Amino acid sequence: MDRRIITIDGPAGAGKTTVSKALARELGCVYVDTGALYRAVAFEIRCQHINWEDSAQLERFLACLDLDFVMEGREPVLTSSGRDISAYIRTHEISMLASATSAVPQVRKALLGIQKSIARERDAVFEGRDMGTAVFPDASYKFFLAADVNVRARRRFEESNASGISFEKILEDMVKRDSDDTRRAVSPLKQAPDAVLIDATALDVFQVVEKMKRIINGVQTRFSDQI
Ligand code: DC
């Protein structure tokens, strides 16, 4: 049976996570955060002191990597060697390392299987950077969520207020991360030609999800409204 796969790609801080979770809930399918996989790789590289620029060492590390999504209700929780690591992968340092290591083709290849295996088993909303382009080119519906970089950095700043990192630093790093994610040679962040672009700069989560639902339910075609 063909699964219903919905992809939501876009840059950091555009609201993909909140929107993807809300959409998955509304549609009654699972939500998969593929950024968490790249963060998990970065976290393990950091913990195990791996020199990821050494290709042989990286290969050995990836061969032993044991990442899995364990279902907790509708939300798969990411585990590494059976341990829930979600509490450790959202730091600023891991964000930057994940962006750097996600550009390495070996890393991307190692994470492909786990993403595809979830899609074989369940209808799902997949959030990431290359969902609609590289991982699920035949997805049922594809969206690309964009927003002004200043608005995105402001959201991240408000989320991470306790960390003590300034707005200027978050903005600077976000511009760098956007540039690295967009310019890397393998699976760069880019809108799939058949993805619907939604600019969320002036929209709230509810409005974005409503637009997506109208398209999925066939009430609105991708060209019937300047989204
Ligand atoms: O969505 P996020 O900020 O949690 O993602 C962390 C990093 O992982 C991001 O800088 C780019 C990378 N990533 C990727 O290359 N491909 C994906 N499908 C998801 C994330």
Image: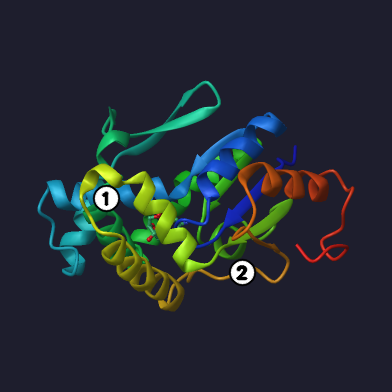
Question: Does residue 175 show up?
Answer: yes
| 217 on left or right of 47 | right
Q: Is residue 118 above or below residue 111?
A: above
Looking at this rendering, what residue extends furthest in the top direction? 73
The crowd level at tag 2 (other Cα within 10 Å; few <14, some 14-19, many 20+) is many
- For the point 37% across and 45% down, the residue is 159
- Front position in the image: 118 or 87: 87
Expressed as whole percent of the image width and height from the top left, the position of residue 9 reads 56, 58
Find residue 55 and report its image quarter.
bottom left
- Front position in the image: 57 or 33: 33
- For the point 28% across and 50% down, the residue is 41
Q: Ligand 1: does it lie within 8 Å of the C-beta at label 2?
A: no
Please name which of the two marks, 2 or 1, marks the residue nearer to the observer.
Answer: 2
* Picture quarter with the C terminus: bottom right
Marks 2 and 1, the one that precedes in the sequence: 1
Question: Does residue 121 show up?
Answer: no
Q: What label does residue 191 carry, if any?
A: 2
Q: Mark 1 belongs to which amino acid?
A: Ala
Query: Can you identify the residue that label 1 sits on?
Result: 63
| 221 on left or right of 152 | right
Expressed as whole percent of the image width and height from the top left, the position of residue 174 reads 36, 66
- For the point 34% across and 60% down, the residue is 107
| 104 on left or right of 138 | left
Expressed as whole percent of the image width and height from the top left, the position of residue 13 reads 46, 56
Looking at this rendering, what residue extends furthest in the left direction? 49
